[in-house]
Amino acid sequence: MELVTAVLGDHGQRPKDDYAVVTAVTELGHGKPKFYSTPEVIAFCRKWRLPTNHVWLFSTRESAFSFFAAYDALCEEGTATPVCKALDEVADISVPGSKDHAIVQGEILEGLVARMVSRESSVQMEEVLRNFSQTPLDGVDCDLGPTLREICAPDRLDEMQKIKAILENVGSSMYPDHFDWSGNDGLDAQSRKAGESVVAEFLQAHPTDYATKKLQETIRLMKQMKPSFFPAAFKCYGNYQKVDSLSNDKYYKMVIHVHDDSVFKRYRQEMKKNQGLWPLYRGFFIDVNLFKANNKKAAELSKESNILLNSIEGSLDSSSSAKDGLADEDSNLMIKLKFLPYKIRTFLIRNGLSAIFKDNRSDYSNYYVRKMESWGTSESKLKELCILLNKWATYIRGKYDDESLSSSIYLTVENLERKYLSEAEPFLEQYAKSSPANLALVRAADDMVQTEKFLAILDAQRDEDDDFQPECGAVPSCRTASLDVVSKTEGLIVFFPGIPGCAKSALCNEILKMPGGLGDNRPLHSLEGDRTKGKYWQKVAAEQKNKSFRIILADKNAPNKDVWQQIEDMCRTTNAAAVPIIPDSEGTDTNPFSLEALAVFMFRVLKRVNHPGNLGKDSPNAGNVLLKFYKLYDGKIRREFENELYERFGSLVKMPLLKPDRAPLPGDVKSILDEGLGLSSLHGVKRGRGKPSNGSDVSEEWKQWEERLREILFGYEDYLKSIQVPFDVALKEVVEQLKAVAKGDIKTPDTAKQRFGNIIFAAVKLSQADILGLLRKVAEKDTDVSNFLNGIKLENNLNKVHITLAHKGAHGVAAVASYAVYQNQEVPVSFNALFYNDKMAALEAQLGIVNGETIVSRNDWPHCTIWTAAGVGPKKANTLPQLVSEGKAKRVPIGPPITISGVLDFY
């Protein structure tokens, strides 16, 4: 169940009421956990009168396409009422929740969860709805005493006092004895400190049932990984209700909380390697009973449990036809679809508070621009939100800067995060009142305006042709180093998120020698890290500030986010752009660089002679240093790594490294690298710059490994040379990419996130050439038409000619979304008449058939507007048939009708 309460701190919108809803039901059984299907959850909850969420089922191709199109149409403005209304209209089955979101939570809607289900779900759901009716919940109108927020308000910041206050208010039947829940204060404190030791003891214990064994496997895998790779918390509390003073057995409640979404992606990769692993969840509570037995009893228990476990695993392996709730990978596929009004409040306002109160005022703008770019926010919304968020930062800093924040800044910010809506909602309310556009932007959480009027507010301010314009225009001043086009009047910083041996110095030296540099008039300057004394990146910033009109080659490895942030800051302060150059490598499941790449980098380093940074042939721990650099990138797969760099800097240059048709990595090379990585984990290699030592502190184990590393890599010298792309080829490709960046001719790499924008209407787009050809034929037969067309600037209007099928404001989201199944398909269009007067002109259209279905426009008069006079909006063309009947416009038949094709899309 999900508990939604203001007691735990503000989140999105403070709920109008504290409530809970059932989100999943599972049975443990003797195999993997079996999750109930959606129809089973609804049946279970209705049988036991438990609260549920709203559920929609999309069982046809048309409805499924319409669902995603409806989300795209609402993603930047969706609130509870319009979203539920749209989904009710496009879904095949709609099951209202027992809790109405708008009533108990409010209009600010976090999002939707879309889950793949079996084909039988629609039949099962219909049967459930027939057999289980929605019954009202008992006690809704009864006085049940103090509310949760009333109970916890006085003790809001103290978790244990909060728990005690709740228990005391539920009555003696649940809380007869303080010790049952809280135990002895001293013992309780001790048990909380004993979390790690309890986990270790649990993993060493012999499991007495299958579920315990599988749980041990999951926890053991998580504990074996380093915390940065699997960030999760393990807490243990004494289970005092089971304590027996006559027994030495131990009883605990173990709480496991996964901190980061990236953990699930990595865990799924482990599940692919080990099919028997149980799935991982965000958080769960476990009763752990650790009991001792004498040697004889222990042996018996061990034998019995081993037989039982083997029997269960054997039956699971042999039963290929057995299908549990997790057997089909598709059944686990689900995605979160969140809405911008919620994200403004939670991610941009609440989560950005710590950045607002940092000394560098640009940290917050860097933060929120990166967030919005990672979401694919449309340019128009990004511009509006930059203005809003800058005003929010000024407002909240002005209110709290006078307080003493010095050493207690993070505590103060943390407290402010918990109650941020007390500040944010009044601010947003005032901001919304300043204009209808601002009201539509922030989507007020209170009853300042009826929800259904939001779209009308937007539609009143824009014309259809304004909507048809592609998202474009200058990025607002709040954008920092992430530039989509690099101007020649700015500086450019070229840097290297790589590993020693990636050929950055050789590359910089060759670029400096090139006549004409990168093809423009900006001078080139290189700053070599190994020959620069002092703080390197501060030196780069100073150089760029002194001579901003040049290209700096930052010849130093830039392996972490701290460095990337410094580069972003210097770009902002010097009006420069930055471009990262990375070695092109497939990566591993845990690192953006493959072991082959690491082997090549090590080989190159060990071949160096007289290296200025003392990292070469004569360095006793060169391999260890490269492992440290390699592990700095741990925790990101290749695509995540490239995505983040592109999102931060707007461009990405890849340097070819390995030949595509290379032989596989020899076993000896892989083994020595795996051994080194294992030693790094075993000895707790700390993250750092990887500065080599003089060798005096290198352990004997490391010395032996370094010797064998050299022996093996030099033994495979021919192989390591053969798999590398020749340097001159790599240099040529990098230079071509850099010249494109310098000229502003940047092409988005395939790692970039798609920018969805916000769907306004569906239309069939037509080509200018086709429409001009059609009009030319009409003009040849009619002198008046020829004179009319010669007297207007037709070409200025035809770059966006289209036939509107449905508009969100006029016809609703569901109407627009219904065309999703035909998106990007060619539609034949027949034109049978030209309508015109001195203010506008349009072609009457009849839409054709696609996939056996006739495309029908929701407009009363399907047409494409081809011209309007200055000051006349394109929507006015809808009145042409009426004007013809009144004698105020002309209708010229086209006989026979002329058919051309256009492409159906959303705009």
Image (spheres, helix red, strand yellow):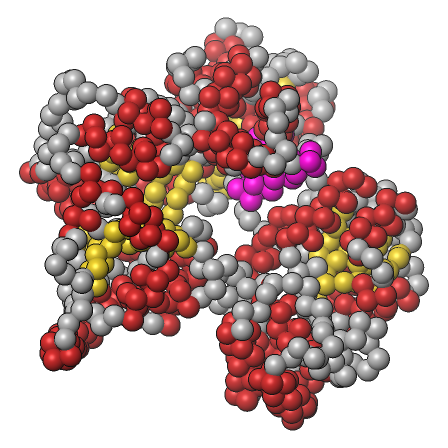
- Residue 846 showing in the rendered view: no
Looking at the rendered structure, the number of numbered marks drawn on it comes to 0
In front of the other: 761 or 179: 179
- Residue 223 to residue 382: above or below: below
Query: In this rendering, would 198 be left or right of 789?
Result: left
Q: Whole-percent x and y of residue 301? A: 13, 75
Quarter of the figure that contains the N terminus: top left
**Residue name at image x 74 percent, y 80 percent:** 619
Q: Quadrant of residue 110?
A: top left
- Residue 421 to residue 197: above or below: above
- Residue 208 to residue 535: above or below: below
Determine if the magenta segment contains residue 360.
yes
Determine if the magenta segment contains residue 572.
no
Q: Main secondary structure of the magenta part?
A: helix
**Residue found farthest to the left:** 131
Q: Which residues are magenta?
A: 359-384
Q: Whole-percent x and y of residue 669? A: 57, 86
**Residue found farthest to the top:** 886
Q: Whole-percent x and y of residue 707? A: 64, 89
Q: Whole-percent x and y of residue 105? A: 33, 26
**Residue name at image x 69 percent, y 85 percent:** 721
